[in-house]
Each structure stands twice: as C-alpha cells, then as structure tokens.
Amino acid sequence: MSTACTGAPPAADDELARGLAAGDETCVAVAYERWSALVHALARRSLGDTAEAEDVTQQVFLGVWRGRHGYRPERGAVGAWIVGITRRRIADALSARTRRADLAASAGTAPELAGGSPGRGEDSEAALDRVLIRSELARLPAPQRRVLHLAFYEDLTQTQIAERTGLPLGTVKSHTRRGLRRLHGRLTENDRM
C-alpha cells in the first residue's frame, strides 16, 4: 500500500493529511519535523518548564497519531489541527499542575513535599510528612485511595479516571471528595497530637 508520505516527504499539507489518515508512520515523522519546534515553543512559553514542554510535545504527536482519523481537512489545515491538540495538552498539563497543588494543599503539605525525593537536601520533617501522607493514604478505603492515586500520582483527570476504572464520573467525583476530606481530617488530627 503506497501512501503520500512513502518515499519523498509530501510537499503539501493535504498529501500529509491523506498519509496520516492512511496510517503512514512516515507522515507522522514528517509532521513532527515540520511542527515539533512550534509545539515545543508554545508549550514552553505556556508552562515555563522545558521538561514539561517536552512531555507535552510527545503527547501532542502521540495524539496526532491516535487521532489521525478524526482530522477533518474542511475544518482547517493540518498545522492548525496540531496547534489545537497542543493547546488542549497544555491546558491538561496546567490542570494537572493545579490538581497536584490542590491535593497537596488538602493534605496539609507543600507540593514539593509530595513529589520530593529523598537525599536532595531535604530536612527530616519533610521526609516524615511524606511518610505520614503515604500512611494515611493507605488507610483510606480502596476505591478512594485508587482514585486519589490516579489523580495525584498519574495526573489523570476525573473523566480519565472514570474511563480507566469503568466507574461512573459522579462516583469518581464522590470518591475524590470523600477521600480528600478523610485525608485532610486525619492529617489535621495528627497535627494536633
């Protein structure tokens, strides 16, 4: 099966779009060569972090490959479609950052305590706080613990958690709310001791 991207790179976006829709991996490589610098620059400017921008760039082109059948040329050029995917991935990254900070705040810790790694000049109190949070998370009922784990450690949205677990979205929201309340209650109770 010969597609538009096999052999020489396609000159026009419409050829590239046809190749992507046909599943030609060469077309994804061509799209990456053409637009990865733009995607990375947009992500870096919005997120202010090179590593996060690299992650977003990778997610965007994975999204291009997975969503190639959803591209509609009548709605805009391939480049515009890729920029649209980029904007959504940046919004997802910013939302994940906010969720991490909110969860850490609900747990009564600073965000760096939740994600810090031992041995990088942290004080013993920070290490003890992390141990306490892990211990209290382990005491939560399994559904609440799983939902909070997916939200905090895997940066999934509640919709993504519902899809992954098969739970209704309302149930995921309830587990999140109840789990955070219990976690907050237990951590403030421990602070009083």
Image: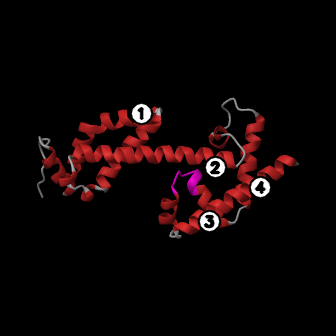
Tag 2 and tag 1, C-beta contact below 8 Å: no
Q: Is residue 21 left or right of residue 138?
A: left
Helix, strand, or loop for circle 3?
helix
- Element on which disc 1 rests: helix
Q: Check residue 46 for magenta coloring.
A: no
* Up/down of 1 relative to 88, above or below: below
Q: Earlier in the sequence, mark 2 or mark 1?
A: 1
Kind of residue sitting beneath label 4: Gly
Residue 105 sits in quarter: top right
* Image coords of residue 148 (percent x, y): 61, 57
Mark 3 → mark 4, Cα distance in angstroms: 16 Å
- Frontmost of labels 1 and 3 is 3
Q: Which mark is residue 11?
A: none
Q: Over which residues does the magenta segment extend?
A: 150-157
Mark positioned earlier in the residue sequence (1 or 3): 1
Which residue, given by chain and number where applicable, does mark 3 sit on? 174
Residue 185: image tag = 4
Label annotation for residue 44: 1
